[in-house]
Amino acid sequence: MCWVVWADRGLLAAIYDAGLDLVLWTVGVMVLKGKNGFTWKDLSSIVNIPMVAIVVGMVFSLMEWQPPVMVKSLTAMLSSIAAPLAMLYIGLLIPDLVVRKQQTTRALPILSLSMIVKLFLYPVIVAGLLWSFHLATEITQVTLVMAAMPTMTLASMLFAKYAADEDLGAMATVSSTIISLVTIPLVVMLGQFILSV
C-alpha cells in the first residue's frame, strides 16, 4: 500500500515537472531570447530530449506498459546521475564567479528579487490556491513541495544557450539551493497547516 502511495506521488511530481518543462521551453525561451511573440520556428525548442522523454513516459504510463527490467535499471541509473552532473557543471562555474566579484555584486539585486519570488512568494501563492481549492492530500503535498524547490540546475544551461549569461544561472541555482534548506521545511509546515484547516 505504501508503494502505491509513493508511486502516485512520483506520478504527480512528474506531471508537475512536465508542465514546468513545457512552460520553460516555450515562455522561458521566449523571455530569454527577448521576443514578444512565439513563432512556429520557436517550436523546435520544445522538441528536445526532456520533453520527448516526458511524453513517452506518460504514454507508457497511460498504457500501463511495464518495460523490461534491464530498461528500468538503465533509466534509473541514468536518472540518478543527471542531477549530480548538472551540479558538477555548476560547481565548475563557481570559481569564476568568485574571481569576478564585481559582476557578482552587480547581479545581487536581480538574484535577491528572484529568490524572494521563487522561494517565498510563489510557495505562499500556491499554498493559498491549494487551500481555496481543497484538493486531495497527496496533490496538495506534492504541489507545495515542488513549488518550494530551488532554481533548477537546467537554468545555467538555458542562460548559457539563450541569454549568454550562464554565470547568472549558476548563481541563482547555488544561492537558491542554499536558501531552500531553510524554506522547504517552512513550506512543508505550511502544507501541514493547510491540511489541518
Image (spheres, rainbow, N blue to C red):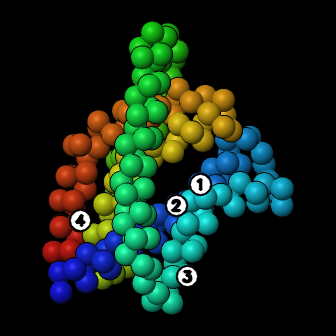
- Name the quarter where the C terminus is drawn: bottom left
**SS class, disc 3:** helix
**Type of amino acid under label 2:** Leu
Which is nearer the N-term, disc 3 or disc 1? 1
Which is in the foreground here, disc 4 or disc 1?
1
Q: Nearer the viewer, residue 66 or 30?
A: 66
Which mark is first along the chain, 3 or 4? Answer: 3
Q: Nearer the viewer, mark 3 or mark 1?
A: 3
Q: Are marks 2 and 1 in contact (CB under 8 Å)?
A: yes
Numbered label attached to residue 191: 4
Within 10 angstroms of label 4, few (less than 14), some, or many (20 or more) residues?
Answer: many
Figure check: 139 above or below 27: below
Do the numbered discs 2 and 3 sit on residues whose CB atoms are within 8 Å? no
Label 4, label 1: how far apart the Cα atoms are: 25 Å
Closer to the camera, 127 or 183?
183
Label 1 near label 3: C-beta < 8 Å?
no
Indicate the secondary structure of the residue bearing disc 1. Answer: helix
Residue hosting label 1:
24
The kind of residue tagged 3 is Val
Find disc 2 in the rendering and name its residue. Answer: 20
List the residue tagged with mark 3. Answer: 59
Q: Above or below — where is 69 with respect to 98?
A: below
Label 3 to label 1: alpha-carbon separation: 21 Å
Q: Which mark is residue 97?
A: none
Residue 20: image location, x then y, percent: 52, 61
Q: Identify the image quadrant of residue 78.
A: bottom left
Q: Looking at the image, do the residues carrying marks 4 and 1 touch, with CB atoms under 8 Å apart?
A: no
Label 4 vs label 3: CA separation?
31 Å
